[in-house]
Each structure stands twice: as C-alpha cells, then as structure tokens.
Image (cartoon, rainbow, N blue to C red):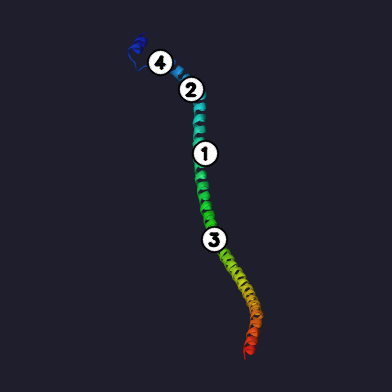
C-alpha cells in the first residue's frame, strides 16, 4: 500500500490514467497521421504543382511575348522597307506618266501647230488667189481707162 500512496502523491511516477491518456493520444495521432495528413499533403502538393505550372506558363508566355514582339518589330521593319520601295516605284511611275503626258501633249501641240500652219498657208493661198482674181480685172479696167484716155 505504501507504493500506491507514494504513486498517488508523487506526480513523477506514472499511474494508469497517464498511460491510458498516452495510449489514446498515440491512437489519435496515428489516426490523424494516417487519415488527415495525406489529403492535406496531397492538396499542398497539388497547389505547389499548380504554382510551379503557373510560373512555367508565365515564363513561356513571357518568352512567346518577347518572340512575338521581335517578330512584330522585324515585320514592321520589313513593311517599312516595302512601303519605301512602293513609294519609290510610285514616284518613278508618276514621273514616267508625267513625262509621257508631256510628250503626248507636245506631240499634240506640234501636230496642231502643223495643221494650223497648213490651214493658214492654204487660206493665204486662197486669199491671194481671190485677191488676184479681184485685182486682175480691176487692173485691166484701169489699164484700159489709161489707154483709152490717151
């Protein structure tokens, strides 16, 4: 009995309730370790995988954005070069069209001047013939009068 009394008085000596509580604690700990911790670990692992995947997606997106910007700049530079070439060709075509129009206008003007000169010469010739036709009888009449007066 002395040991029972001693165990009841000294808290350092384990008694039956502490052992039962320790056993229950270990059982609860085992249940938590077996049934609660694995799903939590799985959720945390899934979340970590999603975070890693998101980070990888972000890096891929950044790389593809950089590549797209490089392609954009390259295509823009090519488009500017092409546009400059088109403008240069358009200027040359415009200058050629203006030169052709000037040549055509000059040819038309030369033709009009030539036709007008021919027409004026023919009118002058007709006028000369008409005047000769009118002057000749007058000159004969005058000559006849002068001869008749003497």
Front residue of 46/57: it is 57
Between marks 3 and 1 in the image, the one whose residue lies nearer the viewer: 3
Asked whether the residues under the numbered discs 2 and 1 touch, taking CB atoms below 8 Å apart as contact, a structural biologist would say: no
Q: Earlier in the sequence, mark 3 or mark 2?
A: 2
- Residue pointed to by mark 2: 32
Asked whether the residues under the numbered discs 1 and 4 touch, taking CB atoms below 8 Å apart as contact, a structural biologist would say: no
Between marks 4 and 3 in the image, the one whose residue lies nearer the viewer: 3
Please give the label number shown on residue 53.
1
Which quadrant of the figure contains the N terminus? top left
Between marks 2 and 1 in the image, the one whose residue lies nearer the viewer: 1
- Residue pointed to by mark 3: 87
Give the residue at the far left of this rendering.
Answer: 9
Between marks 1 and 4 in the image, the one whose residue lies nearer the viewer: 1
Q: Earlier in the sequence, mark 3 or mark 1?
A: 1
Q: Position of residue 145 (x, y in %)?
A: 63, 86
SS type, badge 1 = helix
The residue carrying pointer 2 sits among few (fewer than 14), some (14 to 19) or many (20 or more) residues within 10 Å by Cα, namely: few
Q: Position of residue 101 (x, y in %)?
A: 59, 66
Q: CA distance from mark 4 to mark 2?
A: 21 Å
Please give the label number shown on residue 112.
none
Q: Earlier in the sequence, mark 1 or mark 4?
A: 4
């Amino acid at each position: 009995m002395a040991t029972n009394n001693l165990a009841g008085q000294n808290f350092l000596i384990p008694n039956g309730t502490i052992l039962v509580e320790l056993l229950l604690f270990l059982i609860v700990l085992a249940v938590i370790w077996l049934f609660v911790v694995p799903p939590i670990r799985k959720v945390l692992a899934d979340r970590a995988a999603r975070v890693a995947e998101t980070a990888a997606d972000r890096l891929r997106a950044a790389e593809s954005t950089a590549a797209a910007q490089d392609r954009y700049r390259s295509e823009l530079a090519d488009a500017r070069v092409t546009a400059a070439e088109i403008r240069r060709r358009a200027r040359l075509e415009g200058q050629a069209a203006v030169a052709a129009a000037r040549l055509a206008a000059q040819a038309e003007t030369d033709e009009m001047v030539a036709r007008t000169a021919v027409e004026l010469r023919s009118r002058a010739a007709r006028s000369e013939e008409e005047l000769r036709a009118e002057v000749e009888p007058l000159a004969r009449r005058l000559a006849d009068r002068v001869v008749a007066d003497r």
